[in-house]
Amino acid sequence: MRFTRFATAIGMAALVIAILSVPAFAGSGIEDILYEKGQITKDEWIKAKAAKEKEVAETTKSASSTMSNLLKGVELKATFYFDFTNNNGSSFTADALNKGLNEVSARNNRGLANGFHFTRTYLTLIKRFDEGHHFRLTLDQMVNNIGGGTSCAGNAAGSAGGNCHEAAPYGLSGYAGGDRNSTFVKYAYYNHVVTPGLEVRLGQHQTPWIEYEEHRWTYRYTGPIFVDQQNFQTSSDLGVSILGKVLDKRVDYHLALQSGEGYQNTQDGRGVAALGRLSVEPLKGVILSGFYHNERERNGVEGFNPQRLLGNVEVYAPETDRFKLSTQMVWADDGADVGKRNAPGDNAGPAINVPGTYNGSASNAPLETAAVLGARNGPSTGLPRFHQARGYGVWGYYRIPMLDEKVRLFARYYFMKPNKDTRAGDNQSIMFGLSYDYSKYLSVALDYTLLQQTVLGSDVDYAAGGRNVSTSSAANGGGPTCPTCGQFVNYNNQIFGVKILVAF
């Protein structure tokens, strides 16, 4: 019994020693254990130790190299547009008798349009490969115009405004509203360099014209360019392009097959748009450009086949970038039967798609009435709008030499007539300002815009002081008739803004 207790005590002591020894052995390498037991010499222990350290270093280096290769060519960029604006004019003054705008809407407009705003935020990830190819992903956050709702309902027939667009001309776009801070995938594409002067771009990517002009204009942060603001063309779409510069970069081309709906609209797939841009510089400092868009069908709407044509001439200082001056003419049509006058009693043709008053809702029936298609407050690329439309514009800037050439004077003018058969929808904009390019990361601009729009009156009864769009004199309470377009109402607005670009 005594020996049993003694043996048990010895066994327990051995177990404790073994347990206490585990961390020491676990923290030591096999070469340390062998050296301590005298099974290898000191020189052998040193060599084994050095080999192990080399193996660990190589493993660490390999992991580091893998991570380095993964991050090689990766660029992360962020761009922010924000502003302070003060607005006044027809959209902000209650005048139910002459403008169809009540005090509630006018007050709401003032609250949305005045003050500080984020208008656009872009986050871009680019991965460049050694062969010159690259992949790009850009997320686009915008603040939509009033009435946008939570699903950009302005793109649907019968909606009452809002079209997921930063600047459906003026209204309150780019400021605030129900669809605040919507985020879209603007770009997600792969760009493959086939040969110098020939690239293939596949995915959701730039349409041929808008980004090109934005790059030349450089004042995108003050607002969209003319053709973007008028929804003449969308800036990004799903499809495939070939593009490049040849003949010593004097010829710049971009040809595309894209869906046509644009990156903010649901892809329909029942029509494909063919688009192309050609820019030629015959003389250094003079660029002649042309753009064409043809789409046989969009969203399955019979007769809706958008066509766009644009011509542009730019003169610039090639060595110093001291000045640029660009002039432009555009033509647009959404099909032979879109937006035409209808014969009395003929309900087969479509209504004219033009803006109504900002608080209004014009009737959509009967169709011979010159009504607003979808009763929207601004245009949309998702539905027919243009009928033999014409427009023209000019922009330019000049760097002031005495002020380190970071200060520029800039100005822009454009006029757009969406429908040749009616004044309703006509837009005219004059903008001028002063900008300061503090660095490549920060630019500030002070600008002033005069904007005139012609819209249809509201459907308030004429006898009650409104502007009825009915074609019947009797329905107007004995008031005047307008068999083709309804009563016109001019909106005049003035916008003072401080615009800021932050990019890094």
Image: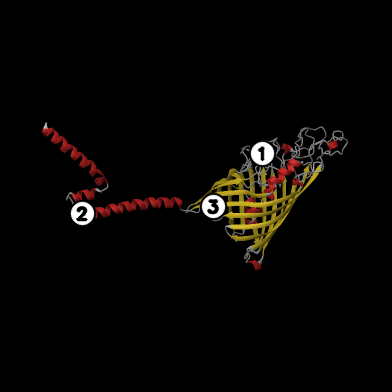
Where is residue 381, by image quadrant? top right
From the viewer's perspective, tell me whether residue 148 is left or right of residue 67: right
Badge 1: how crowded within 10 Å, few (<14), some, or many (20+)?
Answer: many
Residue that sits furthest to the right in the current view = 478
The answer to whether residue 73 is above or below residue 20 is: below
Badge 3: how crowded within 10 Å, few (<14), some, or many (20+)?
Answer: few
Q: Mark 1 touching mark 2, by CB under 8 A?
A: no
Q: Nearer the viewer, residue 14 or 334?
A: 14
> Which residue position is annotated with label 2?
44
- Image position, residue 412 (x, y; %): 71, 56
Residue 217 visible within the image? yes
Q: Mark 3 touching mark 1, by CB under 8 A?
A: no
Element at label 1: helix
> Which residue position is annotated with label 1?
155
> Which residue position is annotated with label 3?
77
Residue that sits furthest to the bottom in the current view = 402
